[in-house]
Amino acid sequence: MSDRVSSIVYPVLTLLLLLVVWQLAIDVLKVPDYILPRPLAVLYSLKVGYIDGEFWPHFLFTLRSTVTGYVIGCGCAIVVGAILAESRTFEKFVYPYIIGLQSMPKVALAPLITVWFGYGFASKVVMVALICFFPLFVNTVVGIRQTNPALINMMRAFSAPTWYTFFRVKLFAAAGHIFAGLQISIVLSLIGAVVGEFVASSEGIGWLIQASLANFNTAQMFAGLISLIFIGVVGTRLVQFLHNRLVFWDRGTANTAAA
């Protein structure tokens, strides 16, 4: 069996096994539906939600806030990380504050972010950007600073400008680390979006899960969780695909990060 086929077959078999165990556990232990719904009830909730259209506004709201915050947070992380990696002076000024910001639990910041940016889309974007910034920032700094010194010395021997050395050597050398950070951040970005929706929102998958909890509709809660899993898996695979195509010389880092 080829690697491509096995990468599809094995997860499907695992899913089927989990569904069987799930159903058997409910039947044997007599678990009430409001505690653990049956798999078919979850599938029905997904069908009603997406075919009838009730879930789509919430799905798209979470997707938009996640993607927007992810792009902003990752863009800032790469820029700040690159500057800090190149400037020890900038590091002395900025790094302690970055560590301090990262040390604060983002859940504790969520109410304050809501006060500053409101109950709508903007506060969710800020939350996502904050939570996905640090992993990529660290990977960018480490990747640039681990550039092979021999390559840098060779560029100096040819009198290459500093900016040329940075873009053509250091940034390429750090590409594997950067994409590994992108994969980590895309999963964390969903956490930021859902936390923001839990704290203050009237739409989004996080809000839908909370509303389902109030009605003890656990099947709909599971449907919301599956929707989040779908976004996370597709996003991670997309980043891994781009890594393998753009940074083809460093596929090991992509596969390790995905694992």
Image: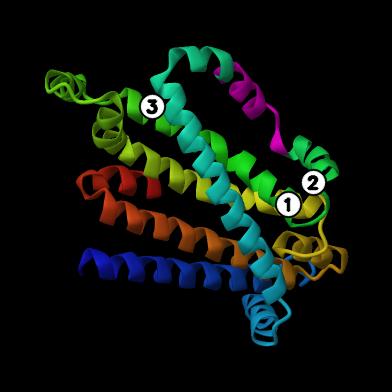
Q: Tag 2, which secondary structure?
A: helix
Q: Quadrant of residue 140?
A: top left
Give the quadrant of residue 244.
bottom left
Closest to the camera, between mark 1 and mark 3, is: 1
Q: Position of residue 118 (x, y in %)?
A: 83, 50
Q: Which residue has dot 3 on it?
A: 142
Q: Which stretch did the figure color magenta?
A: 95-106
Closer to the N terminus: mark 2 or mark 3?
2
Picture quadrant where residue 93 is located: top right
Answer yes or no: do the residues labelled 2 and 3 have beta carbons within 8 Å? no
How far is mark 1 from mark 2, CA to CA? 6 Å
Say which amino acid is labelled 2: Phe
For the residue carrying disc 3, how many other residues have a C-alpha within 10 Å: few (<14), some (14-19), or many (20+)?
some
- Residue 259 appears in the figure: no
How packed is label 2: few (under 14 Cα within 10 Å), some, or many (20 or more)?
A: some
Query: At x 34% / y 28%, what residue is drawn?
Result: 144
Q: Residue at x 34, y 56 (%)?
A: 242
Residue wearing tag 2: 117
Q: Residue at x 68, y 45 (%)?
A: 126
Give the residue number, with chain letter if any, for mark 1: 122
The one nearer the camera, 6 or 238, is: 238
Report the magenta stretch's main SS: helix
Please tell me whether mark 3 sits on a helix, a strand or a loop.
helix
Mark sitting earlier along the chain (1/3): 1
Q: Within the magenta stretch, is there residue 104?
A: yes
Residue 126 belongs to the span the image colors magenta: no
